[in-house]
Amino acid sequence: MSEPHFIRNAGLAAGALLASSATLVCCVLPAALVALGAGAALAGLVTALPQLVWLSEHKPLVFSLAGALLAISGITLWVGRRAPCPADPLLARSCQRLRRISLILYSVAVIGFLLGATFAFLLPALGE
């Protein structure tokens, strides 16, 4: 397997992490600030970054895109998990390191996505 293939896998995992961080910003951050009694800080944050309101208004779209990126990244990582690394010891170490980095990034992205989904959909449904 070539080095660009593994860099692409790390890139997909990083993209999934970025998308899942949008779910955290749209749903977890406002809830956490209000729960901590920092409603004024949230108002200031929304004034400085009005895009947060758009993210919150379009939660289903944000979560759909993040979920699709997570699925694509997960499938790519799953397919490439048993691909051979180069025979060169230096390249083999690099290959294994990039696989670990990709898996860590993907795991953090999934945890972020699940945390965001909990705050966006599960907790409001339980409060009704």
Image (spheres, rainbow, N blue to C red):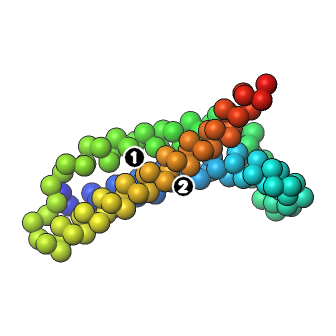
Q: Residue 26 carries which label?
A: none
The C terminus, quarter of image: top right
Q: Give the answer, above or below, for where 6 lies relative to 22.
A: below
Task: Report the amino acid beneath label 2.
Answer: Leu
Q: Toward which corner of the image does residue 50 lie, by quadrant? A: bottom right
Quickly name the residue at label 2.
18
Question: 48 and 116: which one is in front?
Answer: 116
| 88 relative position to 44: left or right | left
* Res. 46 image quadrant: bottom right
Q: Which residue is drawn at 54% across and 55% down?
A: 18
Q: Is residue 101 visible?
A: yes
| Amino acid carrying mark 1 in the image | Ser
- Of mark 2 and mark 1, the one earlier in the sequence is 2
| Residue 47, position as x, y percentages in the image | 85, 58
Work out whether 3 lies above or below 117.
below
The x, y position of residue 81, in whole percent, is: 25, 49
State the SS at label 1. helix
* Left or right relative to 23: residue 96: left
- Cα separation between marks 2 and 1: 12 Å
Q: What residue does disc 1 label?
A: 73
Which residue lies at the image location 56% right of the left edge and 41% below the top edge?
A: 114
